[in-house]
Image: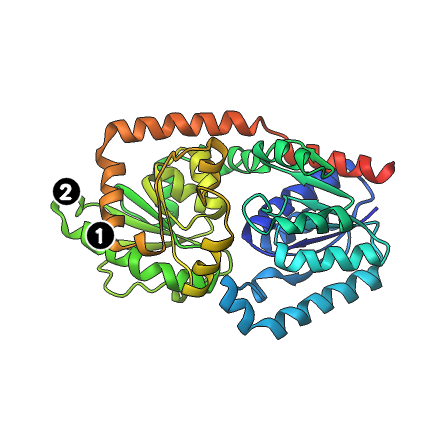
């Protein structure tokens, strides 16, 4: 069968790559054409089967309402390009992975054009813009959800869905980084054997520029303290970024950029500062004490306060329905508060013990391994009906 997959950010690229492997394994004649990134392209090249990558998501990634308005014409052009490519290729199914601003347009187009539409990793309508549920019912043939708290929500909303666990459990557990020795990790990246604090500033250039000044101010303050002078701060660089994307002004050799090894950085870190998103849940599954920090434009923040219906922005906290770790958002995201929170993560033994216990509960709630393969099998079964 012919599968057209659309992913628009780093997490979608990750889950799309594992889904593709499941489709290739269960459908020997799978022909996959996709919008995605390096991980999906690697999955395609492992099989050398199908049409492959159409467009890299990093070419058009934007963050926040203001940024979307500024680049509206470019984004609309990308939507039209995708629609035209789907029409020309005529897939058996269009599989949309998260990325709702773009993918809702594609869902409506594909449905009206007569293509079957699957949505993998549901848009977060339970957090905001619940009116989009009407579009899910109208334009999506089957929704594939990945969080246990979504089961009751979508059942109440009468949305047809399938739940087969969370693919991030597989991605983490299968990572080579979780089995690598500390010595091998340090040697591979040319690092000295000093305790590590991880810094994850996001994947888009806009959010990296927003987060880095406060990250660097916090790192400098801790470095000046005698008890932390021996620490090193490792920035887990996002896919496709360069060293120049990260402002390391004022760094005196205690902040390093590590490419292509987010899981390794998290595993070796005693604490992590994370720009929300998928990485926060990854840290919980790996077992790294963390604080989530996030700041966006004033306009986006204002709109978010009006429309968001959730108590937390981090997936692990949402899964537990309580705060396993703190979230420093907008005005709370300062170097003073960030420094204090990192110190608490490192110095408060009871805090670390409680957080790790909460992480164990998160993993249990997400279920076991094999989600990506189970979703691929369910998709193929749906198509054969």
Q: Is residue 348 above or below residue 227?
A: above
Which residue occupies 81% across, 34% down?
381
Q: Position of residue 114 (x, y in %)?
A: 86, 55
Left or right of residue 368: residue 261: left
Q: Nearer the viewer, mark 2 or mark 1?
A: 1
Which residue occupies 47% across, 39% down?
281
Q: Which mark is residue 336?
A: 1
Colour setup of the view: rainbow
Frontmost residue, 97 versus 125 = 125
The quarter of the picture where the C terminus appears is top right
Query: Which residue extends farthest front?
Result: 306
Q: Which mark is residue 383?
A: none
Left or right of residue 40: residue 291: left
Q: Position of residue 14 (x, y in %)?
A: 58, 47
Q: Is residue 149 above or below residue 291?
A: above
**Would you call the spot at circle 2 few (<14 residues within 10 Å), some (14-19), or many (20 or more)?**
few
Q: Position of residue 209 (x, y in %)?
A: 39, 64
Task: Kindly tell me whether residue 203 is visible in this rendering.
Answer: no
Q: Are marks 2 and 1 in contact (CB under 8 Å)?
A: no
Left or right of residue 18: residue 109: right
Q: How far is the residue under mark 2 from the one under mark 1?
A: 17 Å
**Would you call the spot at circle 1 few (<14 residues within 10 Å), some (14-19), or many (20 or more)?**
few
Q: Residue 270's image quarter?
A: top left
Which residue is under mark 2?
227
Q: Position of residue 175 (x, y in %)?
A: 51, 37
Left or right of residue 353: residue 366: right
Assign a secondary structure to mark 2. helix
Query: Which residue extends farthest left?
Result: 226
Q: Residue 121's image quarter?
A: top right
Frontmost residue, 69 versus 197 = 69
Frontmost residue, 305 versus 224 = 305
């Amino acid at each position: 069968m012919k599968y057209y997959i659309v992913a628009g950010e780093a997490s979608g690229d990750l889950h799309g790559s594992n889904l593709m492997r499941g489709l290739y394994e269960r459908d020997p004649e799978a022909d996959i054409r996709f919008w995605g990134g390096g991980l999906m392209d690697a999955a395609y090249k492992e099989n050398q089967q199908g049409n492959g990558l159409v467009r890299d998501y990093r070419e058009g990634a934007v963050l926040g309402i203001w940024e979307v308005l500024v680049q509206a014409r470019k984004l609309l052009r990308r939507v039209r390009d995708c629609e035209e490519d789907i029409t020309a290729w005529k897939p058996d199914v269009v599989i949309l992975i998260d990325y709702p601003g773009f993918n809702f347009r594609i869902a409506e187009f594909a449905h009206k054009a007569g293509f079957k539409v699957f949505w993998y990793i549901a848009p977060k309508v339970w957090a905001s813009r619940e009116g989009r549920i009407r579009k899910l019912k109208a334009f999506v043939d089957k929704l594939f959800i990945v969080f246990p708290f979504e089961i009751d929500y979508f059942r109440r909303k009468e949305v047809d869905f399938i739940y087969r666990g969370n693919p991030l459990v597989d991605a983490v557990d299968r990572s080579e980084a979780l089995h690598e020795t500390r010595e091998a990790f340090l040697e591979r990246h040319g690092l000295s054997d000093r305790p590590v604090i991880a810094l994850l500033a996001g994947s888009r250039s806009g959010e990296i520029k927003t987060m880095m000044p406060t990250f660097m101010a916090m790192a400098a303050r801790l470095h000046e303290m005698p008890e932390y002078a021996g620490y090193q701060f490792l920035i887990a660089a996002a896919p496709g970024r360069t060293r120049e994307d990260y402002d390391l002004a004022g760094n005196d050799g205690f902040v390093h950029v590590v490419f292509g090894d987010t899981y390794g950085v998290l595993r070796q870190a005693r604490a992590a500062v994370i720009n929300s998103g998928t990485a926060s849940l990854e840290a919980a599954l790996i077992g790294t004490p963390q604080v989530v920090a996030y700041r966006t434009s004033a306009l986006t923040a204002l709109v978010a306060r009006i429309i968001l219906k959730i108590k937390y922005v981090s997936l692990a906290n949402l899964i537990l329905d309580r705060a396993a770790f703190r979230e420093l958002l907008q005005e709370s995201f300062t170097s003073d508060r960030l420094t204090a929170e990192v110190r608490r993560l490192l110095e408060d033994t009871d805090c670390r013990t409680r957080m790790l216990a909460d992480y164990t509960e998160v993993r249990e709630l997400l279920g076991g391994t094999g989600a990506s393969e189970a979703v691929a099998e369910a998709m193929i079964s749906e198509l054969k009906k």
